[in-house]
């Protein structure tokens, strides 16, 4: 019997195990944390030696949380055992076309929008990957006429070998995940890997307004299209308040007044979705219908309540600085900002330098509060406080005379939560308790 090892047992790891079992493999699982595996057909090998763990396996499939320097990964490579990620494993079994979306911000919004547009047409889309639903766990349900729409993170792209989407898009790149990639250059190279296996018959969609991404066009082998809110480009751009499309002939698709999600960054997301769908043959009527009926994912700058004249906004999905700055710029009136969480090793000098003037108070909570505070400028026009809990952070923010309280953490949630969703739920619970 064929044997495979899965390293990590979260959503991706469990999906990989299920796929391998269905495909006739004897599956072993390794984790750095204690495992609770109910499935008797899956072997927990965490207590064995490295050789016993890896030695007889056909390949090792790693979860996104497992980096290239993990001891099991390094040992497998020394033995010549192939190491692949869960996205790569799913790719090997996928019969349908693949649209893959990466970028620092906007991945979930764009992936969901593409999926909704496709599902309004005569085709069927599966929105999977970093969006929170395992590619491997669903790939056997994807038929040749279906489309897998994948949100792909830099962690997932690190471990690809042959992964080649029919359409690949990169939305933006700003500093993030230095705790893993160590530098902006390494992070950028990980993002670029989404295009690395594409051929001339494939398509790349690039954000022309982001110079780092614009420069990718000289290195990709696929046919390149751009999106831009500032320039006329081959692809999609804005002109006279309309979304224009140019993939052979130029024409207006729809007015920005008809687009329910506002802001320049969201227009980039929408135009990227437009191009991805056009390039696989989706008709304009379905694209327009999908855009008009679309709403933002949960915890993306979501209005929660107005309590005693204060608007509360939940932007738990803001897992990096750039995303938080965009949320800050969307606020009207004086705002108290709650930040903090998992320490990614990111510098906050650019954050403080870029804050809009409507941010009057900042409250920090989470594991990285002292890292944030170390970049606080000597002169600043806002109050800055740190506290030990999100509940206390809300209390401190509520004491200020502001129009808005914005929870937009600037970083991941893994210091205290399983993900941004659990963090967002916790914030909403705190706000709801203020009403009763």
Image: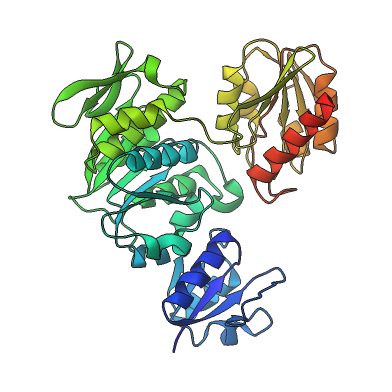
Residue 435 picture location, percent across and down: 81, 24
Image location of residue 238, percent across then percent down: 31, 19
x, y (%) of residue 376?
A: 73, 26
Q: Quadrant of residue 362?
A: top right
- Depth order, front residue of 190/56: 56
Residue 38, relative to residue 419: is it above or below?
Answer: below
- Between 379 and 356, the residue placed more toward the observer is 356
Q: Residue at x 32, y 27 (%)?
A: 288
Q: Position of residue 224 (x, y in %)?
A: 24, 39
Q: Looking at the rendering, in which quadrant would you find the C terminus?
A: top right
- For this view, does 252 lie left or right of residue 293? left
In front of the other: 115 or 184:
115
User: Is residue 120 in sight in this rendering?
Assistant: yes
Residue 81 lies left or right of residue 284; in this view the side is right
* Front one among 250 and 114: 114
Label tally: 0
- The residue that appears at 41% across and 31% down in the rendered structure is 269
With 9 as the anchor, is 337 left or right in this view? right
Q: Which image quadrant is residue 210 in?
A: top left
Residue drawn 56% across and 50% down? 182
Which quadrant of the rendered structure holds the N terminus?
bottom left
Q: Tell me what residue is drawn at x 31 percent, y 60 percent.
A: 143
């Amino acid at each position: 019997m064929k044997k495979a090892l899965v390293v990590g047992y979260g959503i991706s790891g469990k999906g990989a195990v299920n796929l391998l079992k269905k495909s006739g493999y004897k599956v072993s699982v390794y984790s750095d944390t204690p495992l609770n595996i109910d499935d008797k057909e899956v072997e927990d090998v965490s207590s064995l030696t490295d050789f016993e763990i890896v030695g007889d396996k056909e390949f090792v499939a790693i979860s996104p949380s497992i980096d290239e320097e993990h001891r099991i990964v390094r040992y497998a490579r020394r033995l010549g055992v192939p190491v692949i990620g869960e996205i790569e494993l799913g790719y090997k079994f996928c019969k349908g076309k693949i649209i893959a979306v990466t970028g620092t911000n906007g991945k979930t919004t764009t992936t969901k929008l593409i999926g909704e547009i496709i599902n309004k047409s005569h085709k069927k889309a599966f929105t999977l990957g970093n969006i929170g639903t395992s590619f491997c766990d669903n790939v056997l349900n994807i038929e040749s006429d279906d489309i897998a729409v994948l949100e792909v993170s830099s962690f997932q792209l690190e471990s690809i070998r042959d992964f080649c989407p029919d359409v690949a898009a990169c939305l933006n790149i700003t500093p993030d995940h230095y705790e893993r990639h160590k530098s902006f250059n390494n992070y950028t190279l990980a993002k670029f890997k989404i295009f690395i296996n594409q051929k001339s018959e494939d398509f790349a969609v690039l954000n022309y307004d982001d110079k780092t991404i614009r420069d990718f066009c000289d290195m990709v082998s696929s046919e390149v299209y751009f999106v831009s809110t500032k320039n006329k480009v081959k692809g999609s751009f804005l002109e006279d308040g309309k979304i224009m499309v140019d993939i052979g002939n130029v024409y207006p698709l729809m007015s920005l007044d008809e687009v329910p999600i506002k802001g320049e960054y969201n227009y980039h997301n929408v135009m990227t979705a437009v191009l991805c769908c056009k390039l696989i043959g989706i008709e304009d009527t379905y694209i327009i219908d999908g855009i008009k009926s679309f709403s933002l994912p949960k915890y993306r700058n979501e209005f929660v309540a107005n309590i005693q004249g204060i608007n509360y906004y939940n932007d738990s999905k803001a897992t990096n600085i750039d995303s938080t700055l965009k949320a800050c710029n969307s606020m009207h009136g004086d705002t108290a900002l709650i930040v903090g969480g998992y320490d990614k090793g990111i510098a906050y000098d650019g954050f403080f330098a870029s804050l809009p003037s409507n941010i009057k108070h900042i409250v920090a909570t989470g594991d990285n509060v002292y890292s944030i505070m170390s970049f606080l400028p000597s002169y600043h026009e806002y109050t800055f406080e740190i506290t030990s809990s999100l509940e206390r952070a809300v209390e401190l923010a509520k004491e200020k005379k502001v129009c808005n309280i914005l929870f937009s953490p600037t970083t991941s949630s893994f210091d205290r939560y399983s993900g941004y969703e659990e963090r967002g739920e916790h914030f909403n619970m705190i706000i709801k308790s203020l009403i009763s």
